[in-house]
Image (spheres, rainbow, N blue to C red):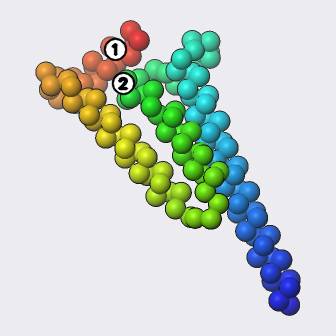
Amino acid sequence: MNKTQSKKKRKKTTIKQFNKDIIGSVIVAVGIIWMISLFSFQMGLIGSLLRGVTFLLMGFGGYFFPLVLIGVGIIFIMDRFNNKELEKSVIILVILVSILIFLDGRNIEVRGFLDRMKIANALSLSN
C-alpha cells in the first residue's frame, strides 16, 4: 500500500508541476505577443487594440507591462520548490503600479481623473 500511495503522490506532484510550467509558458507567450504588438504596427486588429488600450491605461508605462508579464511567467516556470509565485507576482505588479504613479506625478498641471484620461486618450491616439 505504501508504494502505491508514494506513486500517486509523485504523479500528483508531477502533474501539478506540469500545470505550473504550462501556465508560465502561456504567460510568457502572451507577454511576448503583447510586446511585439507595442512595437510593430503589423499585428492587425488585435495588435492595434492591445496597443491602444495599453497606452490609454498606462501611458509610457505600457512598455513595462509586457516585461512584467514575462517576469511573472518566468517565476512560474523557474520556481519549482516554493509555492510563493502569487506573492512574487503581486510584488512585481505593485512595483509596476508604483512606477506608473511616479511617472504620472510629473503632470502636476493636470487636475482630476477625467482630465488625465482625456489627455491619455489624445496622446495614445497620436502615439
- Identified by mark 1, the residue type is Leu
Image side of residue 80 versus residue 83, left or right: right
Which residue appears farthest toward the top when viewing the image?
126
Q: Compared to 106, does 28 lie above or below?
A: below
Q: Which residue is mark 1?
A: 123
In the rendering, at what x and y percent does residue 97 appear?
35, 40
Residue at screen point 76% across, 76% down: 9
Using the image as rendered, state which of residue 115 and residue 9 is in the foreground: 9
Using the image as rendered, state which of residue 124 and residue 97 is in the foreground: 97
Residue at screen point 74% across, 57% down: 18
Image quarter where the N terminus lies is bottom right
Q: Which quadrant of the view contains residue 20?
A: bottom right
Q: Compared to 20, does 5 lie above or below?
A: below
Residue 49: tell me if it is visible.
no
Q: Could you say whether the residue bearing mark 2 is in a helix, strand or loop? A: helix
- Disc 2 crowd rating (10 Å Cα; few below 14, some 14-19, many 20+) is many
- Identified by mark 2, the residue type is Gly
Badge 2 vs badge 1, beta-carbon distance below 8 Å: yes
Say which label, 2 or 1, has the lower sequence index.
2
In the rendering, at what x and y percent does residue 79 appear?
61, 57
Q: Which residue is mark 2?
A: 59
Q: Could you say whether the residue bearing mark 1 is in a helix, strand or loop? A: helix
Q: Compared to 123, does 33 lie above or below?
A: below
Q: Compared to 52, does 20 lie above or below?
A: below
In the rendering, at what x and y percent does residue 108 appear?
15, 25
- Disc 1 crowd rating (10 Å Cα; few below 14, some 14-19, many 20+) is some
How far apart, in angstroms, are the residues tagged by discs 2 and 1? 8 Å
Residue at screen point 41% across, 23% down: 55
